[in-house]
Image (spheres, rainbow, N blue to C red):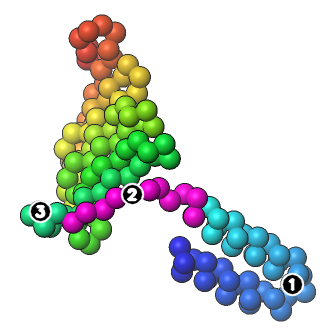
């Protein structure tokens, strides 16, 4: 992000020799200020911990209300690894996902109201999709 901002600033400085310098510079400065503000508000609260047994970084992200947003692990080089869970602000499970060295693998589950979708990944691509609805106490496959 910082690199992108530097490129934009350099481009704006290059344009300062243009006839429309004042208008362009004002737009560039406004755009950079917007980017910096957006990035600072978009960051979620998180908790990181190195698991020395697995050599993975365990992370927990939180919603603004303090409820857990996501849990999972990263490799030391920053790739998603193992099981990841996502929750809404009320604590309801939304997604159960699996990664192997940054690639999507195995069964993923997506919950949305009364619908459960199972997506099978193979070679980081969708292999199949199944959907269930919960119209009674037993989930039925559509």
* Residue named by callout 2: 46
Say which residue appears at 74% left-offset and 90% top-offset: 14
Mark 2 Cα within 10 Å, few/some/many (few <14, many 20+)? some
The local secondary structure at tag 3 comes to loop
In the rendered image, residue 44 lying in the magenta stretch gets the answer: yes
**Nearest to the observer: residue 49 or residue 9:** 49
Q: Earlier in the sequence, mark 1 or mark 3?
A: 1
Mark pair 3, 2: CA separation: 20 Å
In the rendered image, residue 64 lying in the magenta stretch gets the answer: no
Say which residue appears at 42% left-offset and 37% top-offset: 88
Q: Is residue 56 in view?
A: yes
Q: How many marks?
A: 3
* Residue named by callout 3: 54
Q: In the shown orientation, is residue 54 left or right of residue 40?
A: left
Question: Where's residue 10, x and y in %?
Answer: 67, 87
The local secondary structure at tag 2 comes to strand
**Nearest to the observer: residue 11 or residue 44:** 44
Give the label, 1 or 3, closer to the camera: 3
Where 141 sits versus 107, above or below?
A: above
| First to last magenta residue range | 40-50
Q: Earlier in the sequence, mark 1 or mark 2?
A: 1
Question: Where's residue 65, x and y in %?
Answer: 48, 42
Give the label, 3 or 2, closer to the camera: 2
* Residue named by callout 1: 21
Q: Quadrant of residue 32?
A: bottom right
The local secondary structure at tag 1 comes to helix
Give the label, 1 or 2, closer to the camera: 2
Q: Quadrant of residue 11?
A: bottom right
């Amino acid at each position: 992000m910082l690199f992108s901002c530097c490129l934009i600033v350099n481009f704006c400085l290059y344009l300062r020799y243009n006839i429309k310098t004042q208008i362009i510079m004002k737009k560039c400065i406004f755009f950079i200020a917007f980017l910096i503000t957006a990035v600072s508000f978009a960051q979620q609260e998180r908790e990181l911990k190195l698991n020395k047994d697995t050599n993975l970084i365990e992370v927990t992200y939180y919603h603004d209300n303090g409820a857990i947003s996501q849990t999972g692990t990263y490799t030391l080089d920053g790739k998603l690894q193992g099981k990841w869970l996502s929750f809404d602000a009320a604590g309801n499970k939304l997604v159960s996902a699996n990664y192997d060295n940054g690639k999507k693998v195995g069964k993923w589950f997506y919950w949305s109201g009364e619908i459960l979708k199972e997506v099978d990944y193979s070679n980081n691509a969708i292999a199949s999709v199944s959907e269930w609805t919960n119209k009674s106490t037993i989930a039925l496959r559509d």
